[in-house]
Amino acid sequence: MSSRGVGLVVPVKGLDAAKSRLRGAADGGVGDPARHAELALALALDTLAAVLAAARVAAVVVVTSDETVGQELAGTRVRVVRDEPASGLNAALVHGTALLPRELPHGALQADLPALRPEELDSALGEALAHASGRAFCADARGDGTTLLLAAPGTPLNPRFGPGSAAAHTASGAVPLVGGLPGLRRDVDTEADLREACALGVGPRTAGLFVCR
């Protein structure tokens, strides 16, 4: 792949429906919808803060139909576009990558990585760019999901996110990254995942809503 900067698409689901298995984590099990939405937003914003601080990231597109997410990102260098035609995660990623500069390697990053560090993302992108196969991905901490998928300029991203995505991406020809990358691999779906992310060190928005103990 090219060694130039990378364009990334980050999909953010509507906050009222996002991260249903985390409901109650921010308020001691009460499950207040507003509090839950705050936590889902915090996960996304901490992830994006790391993305924007990464030296290898040249362009960022966020695909979302949530107005709050768009408002929070106003004034940043993130381009926010609506999730249209709202036909699922992989379709949203294809929609977003079409808006990135064509000359750049392009990829997709999950929005629930509150322990991600800019230097860690740079390391992963550097490893991915070194592969000549055209596509590379980072599996999650469990080994069956995917947190990052990257493709060379002119190569379709061909996202296979969903259950068993690591195996699906491998079968499609993408090369798995081998680095440790703990923050990049630690996506958050459950409160147990969030506690593991806390042990790595989460960003300030998440830390302000969830007491790591």
Image: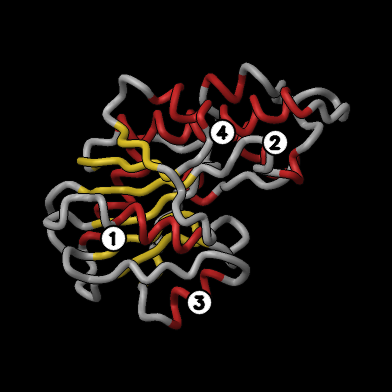
x and y, in percent, of residue 50 in the image:
39, 32
Q: Amino acid at mark 4?
A: Leu
Give the CA separation, mark 3 to mark 1: 18 Å
x and y, in percent, of residue 27 in the image:
80, 23
Q: Residue at x 87, y 30 (%)?
A: 29
Give the mark nearer the N terminus: 4 vs 3.
4
Give the mark nearer the N terminus: 4 vs 1.
4
How dense is the environment of label 4, judged by Cα within 10 Å: few (below 14), some, or many (20 and up)?
many
> How many numbered marks, from 0 up?
4
> Where does label 3 land, which residue?
168
x and y, in percent, of residue 209 in the image:
67, 20
x and y, in percent, of residue 178 in the image:
40, 63
> Where does label 2 land, which residue?
195
Task: Assign the N terminus to one quadrant of the image.
Answer: bottom left
Give the CA separation, mark 2 to mark 4: 13 Å
* 2 with respect to 185 (left or right): left
Q: Residue at x 66, y 29 (%)?
A: 37
Please tell me whether residue 195 is drawn above or below residue 126 in the rendered image.
above
> Where does label 1 land, which residue?
128
Question: How is colour applied across the structure in the image?
Answer: secondary structure
Give the mark nearer the N terminus: 2 vs 1.
1
Give the mark nearer the N terminus: 3 vs 1.
1
> Where does label 4 land, which residue?
43
How dense is the environment of label 1, judged by Cα within 10 Å: few (below 14), some, or many (20 and up)?
many
Q: Residue at x 53, y 19 (%)?
A: 204
Question: Do callouts 3 and 2 mark residues in contact (Cβ within 8 Å)?
Answer: no
Give the mark nearer the N terminus: 2 vs 4.
4
Residue 71: name its quadrant: top left
